[in-house]
Image: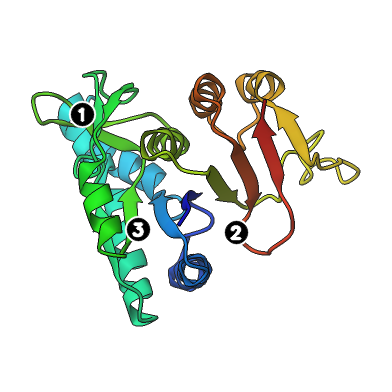
Amino acid sequence: MTLIVQKYGGSSVADSERIKNVAQRVAKVKERGEQVVVVVSAMGNTTDELIKLAYQVTNQPDERELDSFLSTGEIISSKLMVIALKSLGCKAISLSGAQAGIKTDTTYGQARIIAVAPQRILKELKQEKIVIVAGFQGITKRGDITTLGRGGSDVTAVALAIALGAQICEIYTDVEGIYTADPRIVPEARKSKQIGYEEMLEMASSGSKVIHPRAVKLGWVYRMPILIASSFNDNPGTIIHS
């Protein structure tokens, strides 16, 4: 039985209908007989709205409290995803970043993952459950919640794929793969079937928002293949690999 880690971004889980769509996609993977761990981002613009709300209270919100506050967006997504999966008859459970074993340093707002202890995930997988993990967050040695920076759910997904020995890390978004330019701006942009880690890292570091640069670095170091594809259709995406 192979293990796949999937990640769904904010646009893929932006509302209840899209969450139900993702749940159906995940259920199909489970029906194929594969183990699946899913990392979810916050719904749509939730993180922006939470930041705005915090700054309406004060123009200098406490960093520790802000990180804990912002992490709730992904918690909501993960809970709704499990509710949707259970309505389809699937066995599933949601875990926060802390419960999933994501250990970080103490740099609030831009924390780095220093270790992954996935014992809880492995335990739930053995019980044939689909495991839904709240992305973008972790926990320090002192037990404080941290966030990994914007786009940090990509890093969560790749780190978990490595720690769990997954076959591949699949990142689903609102584009069908890696293009020569942004297809929403340049209609004649071409999609690549595959791309190397180094080239993808250059693109990500130069402003491409399809995947977080730190996620690409992790994949490169540990040779974890990463698929970038759309959550809105089944068209082939782009594989990032050696």
99 or 40: nearer the viewer:
99
* Residue 188: quadrant of the picture: top right
Residue shown at the point (61%, 19%) measured from the top left: 205
Q: Position of residue 30 (x, y in %)?
A: 45, 67
Label annotation for residue 77: 3
Res. 59 in view: no
Q: CA distance from mark 1 to mark 3?
A: 24 Å
**Crowding near pointer 2: few (<14 within 10 Å), some, many (20+)?**
many
Residue shown at the point (71%, 49%) measured from the top left: 237
Residue shown at the point (63%, 44%) measured from the top left: 228
159 or 9: nearer the viewer:
159
Specify the amino acid type for callout 1. Pro
Q: Is residue 182 left or right of residue 13?
A: right
Q: Is residue 124 left or right of residue 212?
A: left
**Crowding near pointer 3: few (<14 within 10 Å), some, many (20+)?**
many
Q: Furthest residue to the right? A: 188
Q: Furthest residue to the left? A: 142
Check whether the beta carbons of the residues at disc 2 and disc 1 lie within 8 A of each other. no
User: Which residue carries the number 2 mark?
Assistant: 231
**Nearer the viewer's eye, disc 1 or disc 3?**
3
Q: Position of residue 17 (x, y in %)?
A: 49, 73
Label annotation for residue 61: 1
User: Which circle's residue, 1 or 3, is located before the other in the chain?
Assistant: 1
